[in-house]
Every structure is written in C-alpha cells, then in structure tokens.
Amino acid sequence: MAEPDPEPMASGAGQRLGAPETLGISTLDPGHRPPAMPPGRQVTIRVRMLDDTEELFDISQKASGKVLFDLVCSHMNLIEGDYFGLEFQNHQKMMVWLDHIKPIIKQLRRPKHTILRFAVKFFPPDHAQLVEELTRYLFALQIKQDVSCGSLTCNDSSAALMVSHIIQSEIGDFEESQCRSHLLNNNYIPDQMHLIDKIMEFHSKHKGQTPAESDYQLLEVARRLEMYGIRLHPAKDREGTRLSLTVAHTGVLVFQGHTKINAFNWSKVRKLSFKRKRFLIKLRPDLNSSYQDTLEFLMASRDCCKVFWKICVEYHAFFRLFEEPKPKPKPVLFTRGSSFRFSGRTQKQVIDYVRESEFKKIPFERKHSRVQHNSRLSPLPSPRHHEVPTESGALGLDSPPQRHLEGVGVGECRRPLGLEDSKGEPISP
C-alpha cells in the first residue's frame, strides 16, 4: 500500500540541529562541497530524522544514494556520518538500507511517496570510539527510540536507569513534582507506570550531569545489554525450530526469542552465502568444535536472505577491514552473481580521519531538551562510575570499557571475508 502524500513542511524545517541555511562542507569529502548533482529531473525526498522531525531534500533522480546521504550529513554538520544510514520500506514491504552506489531512481519505486529514515546502521562495541558529541547525541536518540518501541529489551532496573539519563538530559536536575509530572505526560518505555518510582530514584542521583554526560551514561548502560544494536531476521534451522539471525561487530549471532544461543565470530567464518531461501554459514575447520562445516538456515524468501546477506557484508567490511574494498573490474561480456559491495569508510578510517583532522565546533540544538547548555562546545565528558544493573549474558558486561579499536585487525581478517551470492559466485564485500 502506498504511503500518503507528504504533508506541507514548515519553512523552518531545514534549520534542525543548528545547520546553516546553505549547505556546509561535506562530511565525507573533507575540503569539498557535497558531490555535484547530476543533470536530470529533480525529485523531493522526505527524510525522518532521529529527533522525529522531517526534512525535505531536492535531488536528481539520477543521483546515487551517496549524494543524498552526504546532503543529509551536511545538513546536520555531522562528521562521523559513516555510522549511520538511510533506510526505507521497499515494494516488498521490507526495510532495507539505501545503497550508496546505485542511483536513487533504481531503488525508490515512488520517491515522492517514500519516507526514508535516518538511523544508526553500525553499532560499535564502545561508545568512547565516537569522538563527536553530536554523534553520541544521535546514538542516544536511537537508543531512546529502541527502548520506546520495545526492541531493546532489558530488565526493569536497566530500563529505569536508561530513562533516568534520558530525562536528566531533557529536564535537568531532579525535582520531585516536576519529574513525576514529566513521566506521567511522556512515555519512554512500555508499561512505564510501575517503574516511575525507580526512575525517579535513579534521576535524583544525576544532579549536575550535563546533557552530554547523560548521553554518555545512557550509551554506557545500553552497550552492555544483550539486545544492543540488534535487529532480528526470522529464520528456522534444519529441524524447523524458529530462530532469528542477526549481525554485530563480532560476527553473526543466533537468537531464540530474545536470548542469544549461538555466536559465530568473523575469525571463525570462512564464507557467507545464500541460495534461494537458504542462508549458509561456512565455518573454518576446527577439530575442537562439534559444529558442522556448513550451517544452513531457512528464511522466508530469497529476498530476505539477500537483505540479511548484504547487511553481513557491510558489517564485516566496516568493522574488520582497514580500508574500503576496491571495486572489481567489470567483465567485458557478461556478469555472474551480485556486484554488491560495501561503499564507504571503515571504522578504522573514520576514527583515524576524525582524530587527525580539526573541525570547527558548531553548537547544535537538542530538540527535546529544556536544559540550556552550549553542548557542542564542551569536551568529552569524564565517565562517571554509576552502578550499572547486571543483565545476564550481556555482551562485554564483565569487562571494562575498551578504549582501543575492537574488531579491526583481529585474527586473520585483513581482507574481505569469502562471500558469495545465490549463484555461488564469490564477490568482494
């Protein structure tokens, strides 16, 4: 079913996050403006931001997905944009990421009637790897959305603590009547009413905490949760048991319900492929393992397999490779298999780029915050040692925050993982 026509936008819609009226410097090509717009008919693209505002971008239908993405990042003055992406619902009602290489006209069947959503695409293991305060703020907004819709499941203590950091950034220091009234008028988590007292108790301990520090502490709690950054893709094993597949910076994970039951680290995965409805994980030989050489999962359709396979390709390249994979030369006569590959900087390239460059700090607007704070001008907040509720099985729960770049250069993955499409043709990610 087609989406309704876009509603008229207010004239000031383009001023979100303190962006200048004219387009700023492209965040992906230092020293240059966003890529030149190709000739052709212009189309207006509607993008929903993480703070629930919507922006309109005029762009040529022949432009690539990267041109649109660069425009969005430039609009927000976002330096570390590589962690994010634009997703939309395709004609098969599946949520997919906008491909940076393909022209928009080949991806959006009805561009005027499609709403793209700006969202976090790659979740790093440690939010200390995010240098810019604006980036952490956007990550905090993503966590706020995930908690609100119930996709980031956790115990009551973790939920209450996360909400307490969110409202500290929005209304400031604890004042009982104000806090209670705010929680009664704003819903942050499902079934919030029975947790109001616990949320207020946590909030009372955050006195003096700035919005930037609240973002930092929110991410500190969230990153320890089992479901942090997880998007489940329904599947079945060979016995017909209902499972879910997902991908993280560490590798491919298998969930049953909201419980992780298996993990296949990138260092153990030799090849990922799919054939029709079957998603295949080929493991490296391990004499001490009871797993079969190749694991097979059944998904709803070939398209479901391909969508998940593409996400795996991008996750592996972003977190495991030193630099963006180079495109293969095009065959002269014919092609076989998919030409899809990861396009963009890897996490290592992003971190090196930001650390080696100097950027003018530009204040940005926190849409939901009542706290007056010149946020982008402040340094990285010092981590406070709050008690974090334990979450059984949470990733990284027992280890201190890692300040080095995890996942890059680990094991033997200095090159793209063996990946192939449904026709069995190996490709570069």
Image: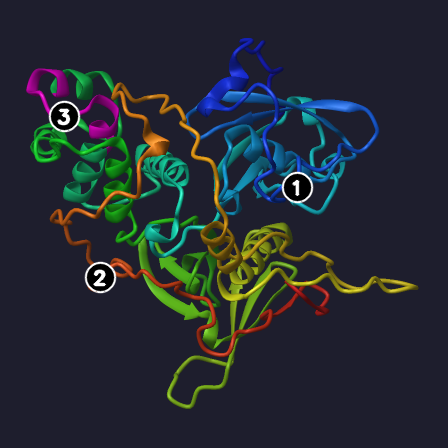
- For residue 148, above or below residue 5: below
172 falls in the magenta region: yes
Q: In which quadrant of the rendered image does the C terminus lie? A: bottom right
Task: Give the residue number, with chain letter if any, for mark 3.
Answer: 173
Distance between the Cα atoms at labels 2 and 3? Answer: 28 Å
- Report the residue at 30% width, 61% height from top: 402
Q: Is 209 on the left-hand or right-hand side of 116? A: left
Residue 67 picture location, percent across and down: 68, 37
- Report the residue at 41% width, 62% height from top: 253
Mark sitting earlier along the chain (1/3): 1
Residue 21 picture location, percent across and down: 57, 18
Q: Do the residues labelled 1 and 3 touch (CB within 8 Å)?
A: no
Which quadrant of the structure image shows residue 260?
Answer: bottom left
Task: Give the residue number, with chain letter if any, for mark 1.
Answer: 66
Distance between the Cα atoms at labels 1 and 3? Answer: 41 Å
Residue farthest to the bottom, as pictured: 287
Distance between the Cα atoms at labels 1 and 2? Answer: 36 Å
Q: What stretch is highlighted in magenta?
A: 166-179
Q: Is 140 on the left-hand or right-hand side of 25? A: left
Disc 2 marks a residue whose amino acid type is Pro
- Does dot 2 land on a helix, a strand or a loop? loop
